[in-house]
Image (cartoon, rainbow, N blue to C red):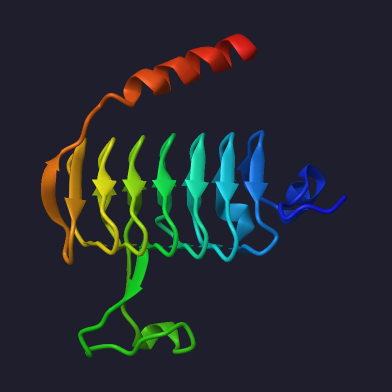
Amino acid sequence: MSTSFYTADELKNIGFASYGQDVLISRKASIYSSDRISLGNHVRIDDFCILSGKITLGDHIHISAYTGMFGGNEGIIMEDYATISSRCAIYAISDDYSGEFMTNPMVPEQYTSVTDEKVKIGMCTIIGTGSTILPGVECGEGVAVGAMSLVNRSLDAWKMYAGIPCRYIKDRSKELLKYEKMLREKEKIDG
């Protein structure tokens, strides 16, 4: 019986650096440099997502449809319980837009200037639909980014942000941490 997600055997053949249990990746997702991608347990990647470059995903991660993650050499790290809503773009790599260099991967490297800086998305963070995260950004634990936001600087933990560029809106509740604790305890018991 065919499903819309890769089977366990098919996941082995993709050639990930590592992957855990209960990994659901849409057959319609595009995976590049799979040997540089590590996936934790309980990870779901939906239709039409693009994963490229160095990417490390923790446990209980969801990446919604049409999202692009471009890890370059420095990489994107998503910690446990993080969520990326649909149509987001996360860049750890970007061309120089100043006009002092040429752009795009079809131009020889000596004529370009590429920024390659790690992006980190903290535990329990949610990134709203249509948002863009630029190289070098760190979203602290528990951050919530509103829809259609441009994240061009690092964000403090347990705060809500929105806008272009994003700005602080208000503090975020930590109530969800009680559920995170309950889930971790349940998983220890279930083994």
| Above or below for 139 versus 105 | above
* Image coordinates for residue 177, horizontal then vertical, percent: 33, 23
Specify whether residue 126 is in view: yes
Name the residue at the top extreme: 189
Closer to us: 184 or 94: 184
Specify whether residue 154 is in view: no
Is residue 182 toward the left or the right of residue 27 in the image? Answer: left
Q: Quadrant of the C terminus?
A: top right
Q: Hey, which quadrant is residue 122 in on the image? A: top left
Is residue 9 toward the left or the right of residue 155 in the image? Answer: right
* Image coordinates for residue 51, horizontal then vertical, percent: 53, 61
- Which residue is found at the position 66% from the left and 56% from the top? 26
Is residue 85 toward the left or the right of residue 52 in the image? Answer: left
- Which residue is found at the position 34% from the left and 51% from the top? 127
- Which residue is found at the position 77% from the left and 43% from the top? 8
Name the residue at the right extreme: 1
- Which residue is found at the position 58% from the left and 36% from the top? 42
